[in-house]
Image: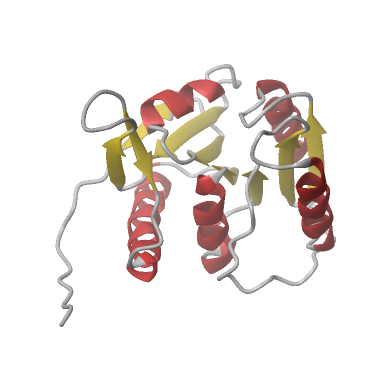
Amino acid sequence: MEHKLIAQKTFRYQQIGERDKATHLLIVLHGYGQLAEFFIRKFNDLPENYLVVAPEGMHRFYLNGTSGRVGASWMTKEDRESDIQDNLNWLNQLLNELKAKKKFEKIILLGFSQGGATAARWYFSSKNEFDHLILWASVFPPDLEKPEHSNNSENYFVIGNQDEYFSTEQQNQEISFYRNLGFQTRTFEGKHDIDSTNTLEILNSILDK
């Protein structure tokens, strides 16, 4: 018979930018097999008015065999409901700590690939905490209730036109799906990766709202 025990765990996150100079908070969730230390570097060129915070998935593992490079994951299919709640609990604790230390004009959440599913769950369970959601090359989590269409264009979906994890047909399906949810959608010349040009253009557009 299975039993469960809730115990304390240490989570880690990376941060770039100076809190005193920042007016906006950008929280970025990495994809499967990535580490926050390296993922956050994709946002190194953002203006100094951004504080960028990259939480790391709680499950770390060797990418090949039993040694060498390590990556992290937000969850697997095993006991996923517990992992979903654990993710939400510690991410909310992190957000509360960040907000207690600084009042931000905007708080933006970006999720890439597998991190997009966690970002979507977090955003829609705590929607009043975030001003904008950016889902990047990510499938909307099927367990999450489909939100009503919104016309305020506060959210974005981005995907590269050569993304190796999405066929052309799948890309078109995802773009159509997100548009029906009221997301603004963008494509760029590239693969399954963060594109710094589009990131900056979206953030600039957000600042204009």
Expressed as whole percent of the image width and height from the top left, the position of residue 35 reads: 38, 32
Tell me if residue 179 can be seen: yes
Front-lying residue, 118 or 114: 114
Front-lying residue, 58 or 62: 62
Expressed as whole percent of the image width and height from the top left, the position of residue 99 reads: 42, 48
Number of labelled discs?
Answer: 0
**Direction bottom: furthest residue:** 1
Question: The N terminus appears in which quarter of the rendering?
Answer: bottom left
What residue is rendered at 40% in x and 63% in y? Answer: 84
Expressed as whole percent of the image width and height from the top left, the position of residue 14 reads: 36, 31
Left or right: residue 157 versus residue 172 is left
**Direction top: furthest residue:** 45
Q: How is the image coloured?
A: secondary structure
Expressed as whole percent of the image width and height from the top left, the position of residue 125 reads: 52, 67
Name which quarter of the figure residue 142 lies in. bottom right
Front-lying residue, 96 or 86: 86
Instruction: Reply above or below: 8 against 14.
Output: below
Question: The C terminus appears in which quarter of the rendering?
Answer: top right
Tell me if residue 56 can be seen: no
Instruction: Reply above or below: 107 against 176.
Output: above
What residue is rendered at 57% in x and 43% in y? Answer: 113
Name which quarter of the figure residue 55 lies in. top left
